[in-house]
Image (spheres, rainbow, N blue to C red):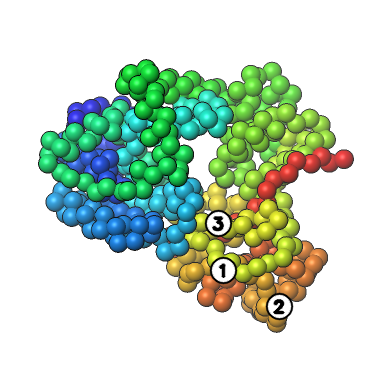
Amino acid sequence: MAGLVREQVNAHCGWTPGTGVLIGLSGGTDSTALAMILAELRSELGLRLHAAYFDHGWRGDAGIGDGDWAEGLARRLAIPFRRGRWDQPQSDEDAARRARYAFLGWEAEHADCTVVAVAHHMDDQVETVLLRLFRGAGLRGLAGMEPSAPYPVEGFPGLRVARPLLTLHRADLAAYLDRHSVQPCCDETNGGLAHRRNRIRHRILPVVDAEFGAQARTAIARAAASLREDDQALVIWAERELSRCLDGEGLRLSEMATLPTAVRHRIIRSWWGMRTGCPPPSREFTVALNGMTEGAAIDLPHGFHAWVQAGLLHLEPIAVDTAVAVQEATLPCPGSVEVGEGLSLEAAIVRWPDASLLARARQDLNVALGDVSAVMLPLRVRAPRAGERMVPFGNSESRRVRKLATTTRGRAQAMVVDARDRALWIVGVRQADAFHVGEGTTSALLLSASRQPMSRSLC
């Protein structure tokens, strides 16, 4: 078993002696096997191992017990261990995933690790590919999870996520633990059918196994690997063409017109990343951008607006209209909250410094950045209070919050994000001077506002 993982690591992960690897350790079968196998390989590969457990807060005492078990395993394996808990748990799977990765990222930074190793295996890969297929994913989505990839949440630019178990099945890992007489924790929620992934695992894949044999899962994973190679070739092609298509900060549509659609889509995604520092837009918006003609315009995720003028595709941040009826709400950190009429606020804790995020915050009123160590959670979203004052960033004197909103946006309606009754940000207007990043900042609180995008023209 360790030999197969060694082959995967050597082929895809690029670890060298001294590499710091933080293991996401839940105490379940998969992550327990990962921790034990990497402990076996530690001396041979020269790894510095650390482990961390994250409690989503969904399972009460059971979650705490799993953390205790994981801590005991780490102690037996002589792996330094840390644990954390989500103070504002939500039922949203994506928010939970981002919260866990953010915690693991912070712990990796604390331990001076450049890799977070997670225990996704071949059966997880098959489930991921099928989920994306049913959503209508393109080549990039159907390629599944990469053995080694950039970190999946913002704010950790030097960190990578590794999946050393992608060539192994869940049954292989369970058999490995049986041979070592290890009884891992059992998360009872994995047996439920509330989530789509579980329904694929417990309803669809057993039918696939019965009809096509157990080798069908290996065949699906092999197909994903083949598609990944094709996608990577198209990405390389697109990167070579991007410089030819750039004209200042815009894209020259006439240069793109001669290229295959798949290459144009990848050029747009790369350009988007360069201009915004945000994750790539969905396929829906990539297709929309690719199809734009002279005079057309479209609003995009993360508060950006694109338009075509004189044959150039342009992109710029737009002010988000926050004039909605404001009802006080808690803003999870990390997490997001819908505040009405399609407007969403999001909070994330990111590694600092990050030049791309700083550039984005300087040009985008829909983003605010500050040192997280100066913020007392929880965060709240609310309307400004009568007579409320704030010292705007870069100023020395306080001003009325409603006056700031009126001066900047031409209206008195405003929305405030606060922490323990201290206003941090007038959304889409100004942030407080006390809420900022500085030379001593190592982790930053990223606040952002976005509205559900709607297509529109410049006519």
- Amino acid at circle 3: Ser
Of 148 and 203, nearer the camera is 203
Choose the circle earlier in sequence order: 2 or 3. 3
* Residue 4, x across and y down, in percent: 23, 27
Residue occupied by mark 3: 336
On residue 380, the disc is 1
The alpha-carbon separation of the residues under discs 3 and 1 comes to 11 Å
Q: Tell me how far mark 2 sits from mark 1, CA to CA.
A: 19 Å
Extreme residue in the right direction: 459
Q: What's the residue at 58%, 58% (across, down)?
A: 337
Q: Position of residue 242 (x, y in %)?
A: 61, 28
Which of the two discs, 3 and 1, labels the residue nearer the N terminus? 3
Using a 10 Å C-alpha cutoff, classify the residue at mark 1 as few (fewer than 14 neighbours), some (14 to 19) or many (20 or more).
Answer: some
Q: What is the residue that sits farthest to the bottom in this orientation?
A: 387
Label 2, residues with CA under 10 Å away: few <14, some 14-19, many ≥20: some
State whether residue 420 appears in this view: yes
Q: Which residue is mark 2?
A: 400
Tell how many labels: 3
Q: Please name the residue shown 81% across and 65% down the image.
A: 410
**Is 195 displayed left or right of 13 in the figure?**
right
